[in-house]
Image: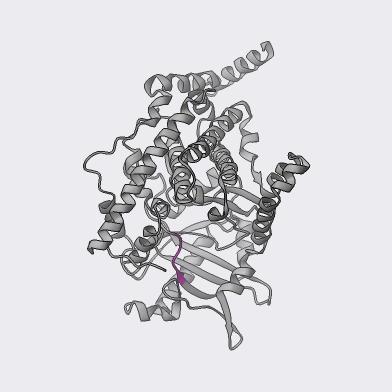
Amino acid sequence: MAESTEVAAEADERAKRAGRPSPNERIAWGKAARARVPLEAHADFRPPPSRDPVALLMRQAETRVPELVPIRHGRMLVSPFAFFRGAAIVMAGDLATTPTPGLRTQLCGDAHLSNFGAYASAERRLVFDINDFDETLPGPFEWDVKRLAASFVVAGRDAGFRRKDCRRITIMAVESYRTAMLEFARLPILTVWHMQVDVENVVAQFRSGLNERDRKRNRDRFKGADAVVAKAYTRDSLQAVGKLVTAIDGRRQIISAPPLIVPIDELSRYASHIDPIALRSMIVGLLRKYRDTLQSDRRYLLDHFRLTDIAHKVVGVGSVGTMAWILLLESGLDNDALVLQAKQAQESVLAAYVGASEHVNQGERVVAGQRLMQATSDIFLGWVHAPTLRGPDADFYIRQLRDWKASAVLDQMDAVSFARYARLCGWTLARAHARSGDRLAIAAYLGKSNRFDNAIADFAQTYAEQNDRDHAALVAAVALGAVEARTGV
């Protein structure tokens, strides 16, 4: 203990000389924040009478491609969880009404359980991390925790889990976040910075920790996990080419599947104002500008390829209605192709409540947040500002369409698997926050008790019930003809 105290004193002294808050001061801030906002206060959620989730969604739709907005609404109708996924703007406004201790970090901004998954690291390992940063901005750390916790209750209810199982799973996610943050507060920042979840190691460690009887009992779960890992290794640019591209007269072309995938030469059928030649020229320019945002070695790698085809693609739930291009690039060799996705980046739904981004380009905002929160990011991740041929110019971020990407198959998970996944997501979110926020202050605020865990679980249950009502409101608005929706797409 004496040695530990001496080390802490030396760290405080170094921080003072550098003009930074000392470790002890940061810990004191965290503890003092409990006086302002007790841990139990995070259970509170009192929606104002003027709250109108459908009106919020309709206002957001005004910034989207009009022809695609009904598809977005149709996808949100499918279930309360589908609605939750598309309603980040609704929850952002709700979170702004909740008490906050003022401990900020880089937020994912949409940290629901389906926005975590596996993908290839630069070292070609399959890693697990947050994988969606469209709404990323600095803000109160607990907002991400609350969205993650609420997503487990909403998805658990959709899956038919019992109320007590939903609560237990949610508590496991939050407890994993809290205990991980306590661990990260004890570690050097360089150690935290380089920590990542290797998917194969996670599966192997779980196997090795079971006795023979439990291994036999979990045989089907292991088969499912192995299948997900094996499938992920096949989901690369060549697989994307095989699925999305056909050869016509010896030339590769993106397959038409309207309205979800529309090749550039067919777009004028759906929007007469579009000139395919001008659009192609615009996207060639987009790629040229994007190249400048990559590291020099990755620019060299990109230069091995040339753009050969383009299509518009509908993506996700909440993102439907924003512009998203898939770009086929080829090197001239048969087994050498790259598929990139250029996705429009709009202002974060959090900006109205936490302030505008320091980045003028919203694509750069997404990329900067992603690089800060992820342990390792796509080597082709970059951004650009480009004309759209429809309305004002827009910001985009660009990444590989597929690079060993895999997600949890929620409808094949039982309560036990869900609980393990909850722990993994909680740990991963804490690691992202520890990289970008004050891990010492946050850990000191959370403490060693389970009061925060239970308060967030209470909030998540209340919010899941509110989400059910919001989903029902959208269903009613569609039935009345006030909102247009296209289902089954």
The quadrant where residue 102 appears? top left
In what quadrant of the picture does the N terminus appear?
A: top right
The one of 299 and 336 positioned closer to us in this rendering: 336
Q: Is residue 197 above or below residue 320?
A: above
Q: Residue furthest bottom?
A: 249
Front residue (pair 33, 279):
33
Q: Position of residue 3 (x, y in %)?
A: 69, 14
Residue 304 visible, this angle: no
In the rendered structure, the answer to whether residue 95 lies left or right of residue 420 reads left
Q: Main structural element of the magenta stretch: helix, strand or loop?
A: loop
Which corner quadrant holds the C terminus?
bottom left
Position of residue 154 measured from the top left corner of the image (x, y, whole percent) = 43, 46
Q: Residue at x 44, y 71 (%)?
A: 260
Question: What segment carries the magenta color?
Answer: 312-316
Q: Colour scheme used in the picture? A: one colour
**Relative to the observer, which residue lies in front, 322 or 215?**
215
